[in-house]
Structures are given as structure tokens and as C-alpha cells.
Amino acid sequence: MAKLLIKNGRVVDPASELDRVTDVLLANAIVRKVEDNIIAPEAEVFDATGLVVTPGFIDMHVHLREPGFVHAETIETGARAAAGGGFTTICCMPNTSPVNDSAHVTSYIVERARRAAVVNVFPIGAITKGSNGEDLAAIGGMKRAGIVAISDDGRPVMNARVMRRAMETARSHDIPVIDHCEDLNLSAGGDMHEGLVSTKLGLRGIPACSEDVIVARDILLADVTGARFHVAHLSTRHSVAMVAEAKRRGLPVTCEVTPHHFAIHDGELLPYDSNYKMKPPIRCSHDVEACIAGIASGVVDALATDHAPHAGSEKMQEFEKCPFGILGLETAIGLTLQRMVVPGIISLQRMIELYTTGPAGILRLNRGTLKPGSPGDVTVLDLQRKWTYDVNKSFSKSRNSPFDGHEFPGGPVATIVGGKIVWQAE
Ligand SMILES: [Zn+2]
């Protein structure tokens, strides 16, 4: 039986209200013991002196591009990038080719992940067939095959009647509906956030209200149907306020924010650099401040990367032509430490919740803690490790990150999945 003993780390497990220097013993892929001075002569020892030992981080919003776009990413390379970024579990969005809209595709992803992925991979199924926005996908079959939520991320459902039926179905299968909230008619033709900066640059804008109207619609539909509704990559101040109000009313509404949406505002982006082009776009400073306040206050339930690899040939086009999306897995922890924890906006414990119990609770993943009996997934952080992100050394197949060359004040140093070390910093 393989055993791994993590010695002398500062173990921070918000679910157990634990924050002290102690030992963690993993055996047979689960957490066996969290105690002082564990003696296990047969175990491999990981010396975590001076390091922070936390439950394995979960990224609930990742694009793995397989099947269909394996020139940009595969399940194997995306999982390696996750491990290199400190994540032990990722959830992959269904906008592959074919779209993950049937048990057949879900099973393919689950099987590929079992063989090729170094981290846990949970698929998210499509809401509608081919994400066409009209006919519901085979939600029950996909649930049995292993999906943990449904979403038409990237091609959001515009028809409110279809979304209502999707929520009713999701409720009967007890899974959440994750919506990429964007009114495609309001955002059509836009390349960046609509505001002063887009006007100055002469680029077409994506207004904040294109997100807000769909967040409003979906909260109303969640109220009508009783479905669990989760806002993907929330980015505007009005959306933060609406989610806060929905929570006050006791509705089952949750949301996530990405690191790039709290780390930069539209006045800071490099004009015409396609590595700053994503949906939702980098918003103005008022929206960024509201997202940060929502993360600090508890309105925001999870941080998620929206890791969206695109091959160089696609991203290296004129700004108007290139696709939306950036890498995120390898810079998320560094950005969160730098922008949220170091300045004291949130505590280290709160950061860990946002990447563990937060997403685990939304998706009911039964992980995100180091309580004995939990999966043996651990993320090890070094809060003193200064490092620089070199995108050319990324485990991802793609290179589209605006944070290439960025210096971070701390980050992950080891990723342990099912009791095995799957990545360690050099
Ligand atoms: Zn999206």
C-alpha cells in the first residue's frame, strides 16, 4: 500500500477549521491521519517545513479542447498544466467537437482522463444538443456517465423558455446549471469592454449589460424552477449586486470570478494584444472593484480560471479576428496570492475556501478537505517563493497568456493527487 507522509507543513484546512504546523499521512489514495509527529517508517516522506499544506485545489471551469481541437490542448496536456498550477481537480466545459451532449461523449472524456490525466477530471455536459440553444441534450444519460453540471459555456442559451426547461431538468437530476451569461445580441461584434477605453482605441464594445440582463433572467428562472444556478466568470458590478440580492432571498444561486477579472482593468490592458481578448472582457475599474469586494464579502463562492487554450496560429491574428480566451491554470494561484492575499483583501484561509470547499460545494464533489477519509489530494504552497511565469515552458499546448514574464510573490510548489506527487516545482 503506497503511503506518503507530509511532515511539518502549516496545514490549512478551512473545512476542519485547522491552521497549524502538523503532519498529514496519505495512504491508499486517501487522507488517513492529520496529527502531530506521525510515525510511518514505510511511507515516502515529503518535507513541508516552511510550506503551506492545503486540500487539493479545484478549478471548476476549464476548456480541455479534446475531443476535436487537440492542436490547442488535450486532456493530458491540460491536466499537466493543472497540476503545474497546483490544481488536483478540474471540470471541463462541453464545447469540444463533438460537443459533450451525450453519454457517449461524456464516457469518452471520462475514459481518456482515467488513462491520460494526472489530475481528477469531471466533465460538464451541454445544456442543449450541439449547444444549439434549442433542443435539450441527453442530460440524464450524461449524469449517469459522470457529468457534474450542465452548461452551454461559450454559446449561451438565448431562448428563456429553453433555459427554463433546462433548469427544470437539472433540478430533477440534482445538478447545477452553469451559465456563461451573455446576451449575444447586445454583445454582437464587440471585442473588448464597452467604455471610455474602447472608444479611445476605436474597438467595438461588449457592454456590461450584455452580462447583466442574462444574470437577471437566470436568477428569475432559478426562482421559478428551484434549480441551482451558477454564474460562470462573473465580471460586472450589477451582476455582483444581483447575486448578493438572490442570496439574501435564499435562492440557490452561486457564482465564480476568474483571476484575470480581478487582476486587471481595461485601462491596463495592452491595446490590440490578443492575449487580452476574452469573454467576458476585462472590465473597467468599477466592475473590478465590485468583483474584489464580492470575493472579500462572500458573495463570490469560487475562483475559477476559464483556462481557454488557443493555438498560436489562431491567436496571432488581428485583434478583431482572433478568438476569445486565455490560459489560466498556471497563474491562478500566483495572481490570487499577489492581488488578494498579500494586500490583505482576503485571508489565506478564504483563498483556500474559494478553490476548495467553494467549488466542491457547488458541484457536490465530496472533496476539498483534508478530513480523514477524504481523497488524498493535496496542494502545497510556498508563500515566499518568488517566481516568474514563462509561458514557453507551460505544460499547456497553447501559449496565449497575458501574464508571460509576470513575477509572482508566491505560488504552488507541489501537487499531490490520490496520494501521489504528480508535480513538483524545480
Ligand atoms: Zn464562458
Image: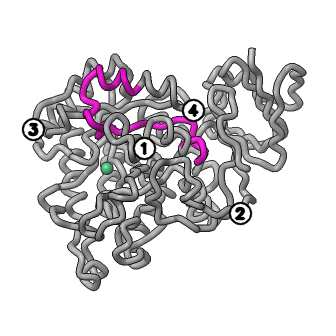
Write the residue at 9% across / 38% down: 161
Disc nearest the viewer among 2 and 1: 1
Identify the mark nearer the N-term, 4 or 1: 1
Colouring: one colour
CA separation, marks 4 and 3?
40 Å
Which numbered disc, 4 or 3, marks the residue that appears first in the sequence?
A: 4
Circles 4 and 1, Cβ within 8 Å, touching? The answer is no
* Quarter of the figure with residue 56: top right
Residue where numbered disc 4 is placed:
118
Asked whether residue 53 is in view, the answer is: yes
User: Where in the figure is residue 306, as x and y percent of width and height?
Assistant: 40, 50
Q: Earlier in the sequence, mark 1 or mark 3?
A: 1
Residue in front for this viewpoint, 421 or 364: 421
Which labelled disc corresponds to residue 161? Answer: 3
Q: Position of residue 27 (x, y in %)?
A: 73, 20
Q: Is residue 104 magenta?
A: yes
Q: Are marks 2 and 1 in contact (CB under 8 Å)?
A: no
Instruction: Name the outermost residue toward the bottom.
Output: 200
CA separation in Å, label 4 and label 1:
15 Å
Q: Secondary structure at mark 3?
A: helix
Residue 73, label in figure: 1
Write the residue at 59% across / 41% down. Answer: 83
> Is residue 44 toward the left or the right of residue 243 in the image?
right
The residue positioned 64% from the left and 52% from the top of the image is 348
Q: CA distance from mark 3 to mark 2?
A: 51 Å
What type is the residue that disc 4 sits on? Val
| Residue at 69 percent of width and 17 percent of height | 28
Labels 3, 2: front one: 2
> What stretch of residues is rendered in magenta?
82-109
Residue matched to label 2: 386
Under mark 3, the amino acid is Arg
For discs 4 and 1, the disc positioned in front in the rendered view = 1
